Image (cartoon, rainbow, N blue to C red):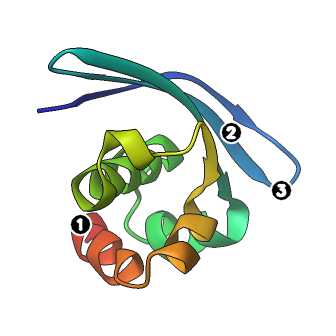
Amino acid sequence: MTNIQIISDTETATGYQFEVALDGPGWHSNHTVTLSHADYERWGSEGGMAPATVVRRSVDVLLRRIGPERLRDRFDVGEAMQLYPAFEAEAYRTLE
């Protein structure tokens, strides 16, 4: 099981930026993850979810889908959905 920890979060003019640390059995990695205001409105705000929760759950879906070795050092949640066609449906189910 992977531990997903939000180290820091910053609101920017266009959305949110998170520094995320991942720890798994025998490995550790750090990532910068962005979430646009539009994507947050789409997936999190209606359900009262914090932006950090949307990012944490999205990272979890990506880890299960592609594995930690393929996770980029910097990525945007919305762009990840475009790269992996089934990601949006799976992430949306996870966020409900």
Where is residue 92? Give x, y as percent: 33, 75
Q: At label 1, which amino acid type do we have?
A: Thr
Whether residues under marks 1 and 2 lie with C-beta atoms below 8 angstroms apart, the answer is no
Q: Give the residue at mark 3.
A: 14
Q: At label 2, which amino acid type do we have?
A: Gln
Count of picture labels: 3
The residue at the far left in this view is 1
Q: Is residue 72 left or right of residue 24?
A: right
Residue occupying the point 27% across, 75% down: 90
Pick whichever, 69 or 52, lies toward us.
Answer: 69
Q: CA distance from mark 1 to mark 2?
A: 21 Å
Instruction: In the rendered structure, find residue 94 and report the number of the disc placed on it.
Output: 1
Where is residue 66? Give x, y as percent: 32, 57
Specify which label sits upstream in the sequence, 1 or 2. Answer: 2
Q: CA distance from mark 3 to mark 2?
A: 10 Å
Instruction: In the rendered structure, find residue 17 and report the number of the disc placed on it.
Output: 2
Element under disc 3: loop
Where is residue 56? Give x, y as percent: 38, 43
Residue 73, placed above or below residue 65: above
Where is residue 9? Give x, y as percent: 62, 29
Residue occupying the point 55% across, 31% down: 31
Residue occupying the point 11% across, 33% down: 1
